[in-house]
Image (cartoon, rainbow, N blue to C red):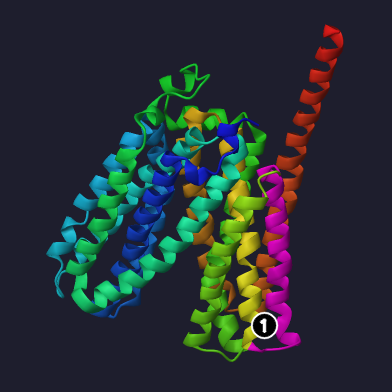
Amino acid sequence: MDAVSSRSIWRRRDVTLLVGGTTVNGIGDWLLELALPLYVFLETESGLATAAVYILNLLVSVLFGPLGGSLADRWPLRATLVGTNLLQILALGPLLLVSPDRVWPVYVVAVLQGLISNVNDPAGFALLPRLVGDEQLVAANSAMSAGGSIARLVGAALGGIAVATGGLTAVVVADAATFAVGALTAWLISPAADRPPAGDTGGARADSSVRAGLRELRARPAVTALLGIQGLAMLGFGAFPVLFIVFVTEYLDGGGTEVGVIRASSAFGGLVAAAVIGRFVSRHHPAELMVAGYLSFAVVAFLFVNGPTVTTALGVYIVLFALSGFPNVSAQVGSTSTAQMLCPPDVLGRLGGLMSATGAVGFGGGSLLAGVLLESFTARTLFNGQVVCLVLCGVIGAVFVVRPIRRDQTATAAASRAGSGAGT
């Protein structure tokens, strides 16, 4: 490994700019994700009107995700990040038209922001592998994961504060500031990042349609398996918010405070996990990291869900939920890094968009199933169903992703040895 490839990712200016800009952009996204439905509920007191904001976000990801990824593959990535951040500022404008008796512009903004994010996110997903080598992808994605956790914590808090203190005007100002910073950091990334990757023949770039991207991905069974894992995992995660609240209230005799404290512990555990994984786990193939993450996540989840048979002490569940941050980050970082390594560079945007759509379908389906099945099953039973989903993710990853990778590595090593023998 040469000196350039082995140095810390934080000594790479472009990586620091991308991680920083993505984090700040994420703060803006999370700010809106909390602020818009909160404002709608406060003004209308309608659960249906509030849920419509979330439903629109999911629908946009499902319907536009692959096309947004196609646009990211078609345009220069760095310029796309600059443009999408600036467009997100402009898309906040309709919020200034909102009044207590006119909330419909909120839904317009939710749709516009969703459309733009479904181009911005695949562009960032496709750009990162251009800035680091394969041996540093895990470290770089760990940094992105830590940034995502920070964005969630800060953005959600800012959204609530902005609505409570300054209404939607404060939301517009705060959000516009985050998107302006995102545009600036993207603009400061080296223009060389927009050049075609080394070895690119131009074939994929010549046809950047969704259909062409799907053909490329179907030709790679391991990538197809990753999409299946993504959908299955998000099915479980989609059911989680509803099941978690019911579980804490029914089995731990908790309330809003307990729900908030336990959930917050996962975010902090995730931040620690991202730092540890980025520093010490890069020597392993990210696919192995993904499988280990899902299987260990299943173990921690099983202990959490079935813990009430032994104890209901709050501290135990805070610790267990904090520990879940490690396997969760391992699974997500491993999955993302594996996808970036296995997929052709000029199809990465479409893969990112398709992963977004698959995740949205899984999350929406999980939320709906949880609500329906709670009428017939206990939260604990359904939570154990989520454990099964995590085990299946690990098994599918081991059989259809890790095993083919190892087989290819063995074949490559054998061919190299045969070539060396022939040369002598």
Q: Is residue 335 visible?
A: yes
Q: Quadrant of residue 405?
A: top right
Which of the two residues, 180 or 342, is positioned nearer the viewer here? Answer: 180
Q: Is residue 217 above or below residue 265?
A: above
Q: Position of residue 227 (x, y in %)?
A: 59, 45
Quadrant location, the C terminus: top right
Residue at (75% x, 29% y) in the render: 408
Residue at (50% x, 58% y) in the render: 146
Q: Is 225 on the left-hand or right-hand side of 423? A: left
Residue at (44% x, 32% y) in the render: 210
Residue 77 falls within the magenta-colored stretch: no
* Magenta segment boundaries in residue numbering: 284-313
Q: Is residue 104 above or below residue 143?
A: below
Q: Is residue 307 above or below residue 212?
A: below
Q: Is residue 378 visible?
A: no
Q: How would you classify the magenta stretch by its main secondary structure?
A: helix
Q: What is the count of numbered marks? A: 1
Q: Position of residue 80 (x, y in %)?
A: 32, 37
Which of the two residues, 289 or 368, is positioned nearer the viewer here? Answer: 289
Q: Position of residue 344 (x, y in %)?
A: 54, 29
Q: Position of residue 326 (x, y in %)?
A: 64, 62
Residue at (67% x, 89% y) in the render: 312
The extreme bottom residue here reads: 253
Q: Secondary structure at mark 1?
A: helix
Q: Quadrant of residue 412?
A: top right
Residue that carries the numbered disc 1 in the rendered image: 316
